[in-house]
Image: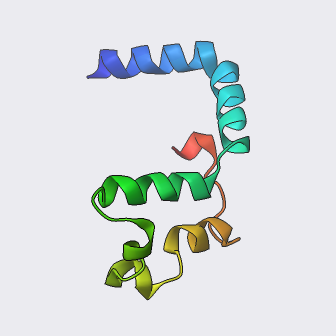
Amino acid sequence: DILAEMQFIKIYDENEQLILTHRAQFEAHVDIYKIIAAYKKICHPNENEEDLHILPLLHQYENPVIEFYNDPDTGMVPLQYL
């Protein structure tokens, strides 16, 4: 385990700038609405969009993922803490 962790740290250190660049590109192009729509279809493949609104869990809140995403108190966690 120690050797594997050391190897991970070595690989990360060698590629840190590339990782951070790709992370920034990914975060700049996140479309939360498309992600939510995809998950709804995955979770309820036999339901159409109109039927999804009657589900109690989804009806309880307008959209908890969007609320979380838009909440300024849920800022990004710095990479060094991940």
Q: Residue at x 37, y 83 (%)?
A: 54
The color scheme shown is rainbow
Q: Nearer the viewer, residue 80 or 21?
A: 21
> Image check: 70 left or right of 81?
right
In the displayed structure, 68 sits above or below 30; it is: below
- Residue 39: image location, x then y, percent: 41, 55
Q: Nearer the viewer, residue 50 or 64?
A: 50
Residue 70, quarter of picture: bottom right
Q: Residue at x 59, y 18 (%)?
A: 13
Q: Residue at x 38, y 65 (%)?
A: 48
- Residue 5: image location, x then y, percent: 37, 22
> Image check: 56 left or right of 14?
left
Residue 79, quarter of picture: top right
Q: Nearer the viewer, residue 44 or 57?
A: 44
In the displayed structure, 37 sits above or below 55; it is: above
- Residue 26: image location, x then y, percent: 65, 36
> Image check: 36 left or right of 17?
left
Q: Residue at x 43, y 19 (%)?
A: 8
Count up the numbered dots: 0
Give the position of the N terminus as an image quadrant: top left
- Residue 27: image location, x then y, percent: 67, 43
